[in-house]
Amino acid sequence: MDTQTQNVFEHLRALANKAVALLDDLPARRALIDTYFQVDGQAASVIGSVQPDVCGDIPLEWVCAPGVDTVRRTLYIHGGSWVSGSLAGYRALASRVSEATGTAVLLVDYKLAPEHPFPSGLMDCTMAFQWMRENGPDGASLASQSLIMGDSAGGNLTLAAFLALQDADGPVPDGLVALSPATDFTGGSPSLQTHAERDPVIHPLVYKALAPLYLGGKEPRHPWASPLFGDFTQAPPVLLQVGSEEVLLDDSTRLAEHIEQQGGRVELHVWDDMPHVFQGFAPALTQANSAISQIGAFVKGL
């Protein structure tokens, strides 16, 4: 493991220890999670511009690298265990996604649990996608290409948003990109146990802890909660990226197998020695830069 990666692991272990101490202080825990990608205590710089917008009562931000084609658009759904995460914590990553894909990236500040349990946040994401298809950074205009992308809980919501849009017989995205997605609230992935000592930040009982907060008693096998059980027979191309050290590794490998069995097109990239949502550590982490470049190649190849 190289020095850059070791620094990331040490940062994440320290963050996980702090998070345990803040279990009963949700505002402080949310503030802590906003520092997830700040290995050296500093947020990465934002490439390009950030422009606030709104869809009904849902705050949004357009993040556009210089020279992007604003009729090609990506909805980015941030992670944070469905209970945390913010626009501010994801601007830098969104800007690098914008640069790599050549798309205007729309960050969505969806409603968080436990104040707003399932499916409130998901409905915000589907509404934001529908709005994005008809509105860009320069105002009302139809998108020529529209994608959904997200990480961790946001990866879950990325996949669930497609399933919800499909169930509503509405327009669906042209592609899906999920980074370290959570896909099975039943906790059926073997890596939850086999990787418990390898993952520096995600606890193997993550689903047991979060189900009461997010699902609020809803069925954990519902495809909108656990996309692993969804219908991907008519899905657009899907890219999954995950680190080899994650307890959620098999949430991606099992989903990729599920999509393939249903006849869908899916690319699964497992990155050696990488932790949860390592892409957010760009530009400091070499592997993060390479992974974002692969995202760009996938999107441009659609």
Image (tube, rainbow, N blue to C red):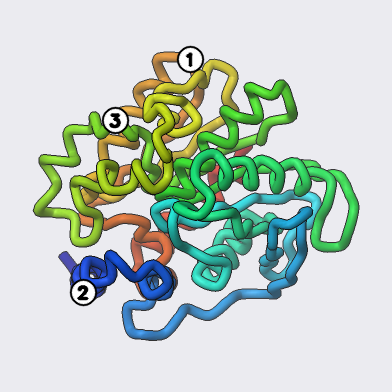
Marks 1 and 2 sit apart, C-alpha to C-alpha, by 42 Å
Instruction: Say which element carries label 2.
Output: helix
Residue 6 falls in which quadrant of the image? bottom left
Identify the mark at residue 14; answer none if there is no mark.
2
Q: Depth-wise, is mark 1 or mark 3 nearer the camera?
A: 3
Q: Identify the residue shown where x is 69% and y is 65%.
A: 61
Q: Identify the residue shown where x is 36% and y is 85%.
A: 41
Q: Position of residue 112 (x, y in %)?
A: 51, 55
Q: Earlier in the sequence, mark 1 or mark 2?
A: 2
Q: The disc labelled 3 sits on which kind of residue?
A: Thr
**Relative to the observer, which residue lies in front, 138 or 290?**
138
Please identify the residue farthest to the bottom as the structure is shown: 41
Identify the mark at residue 186; answer none if there is no mark.
3
Q: Depth-wise, is mark 2 or mark 3 nearer the camera?
A: 3
Is residue 245 depicted above or below 16 in this figure?
above
Instruction: Say which element carries label 3.
Output: loop
Marks 2 and 3 sit apart, C-alpha to C-alpha, by 28 Å
Q: Position of residue 264 (x, y in %)?
A: 50, 20
Q: Which residue is mark 1?
A: 263
Instruction: Say which element carries label 1.
Output: loop
Q: Identify the residue shown where x is 24% and y is 55%.
A: 202
Q: Which quarter of the figure is the N terminus placed in?
A: bottom left
Is residue 210 depicted above or below 259 in this figure?
below
Q: Residues within 10 Å of mark 2 (few under 14, many from 20)?
A: few
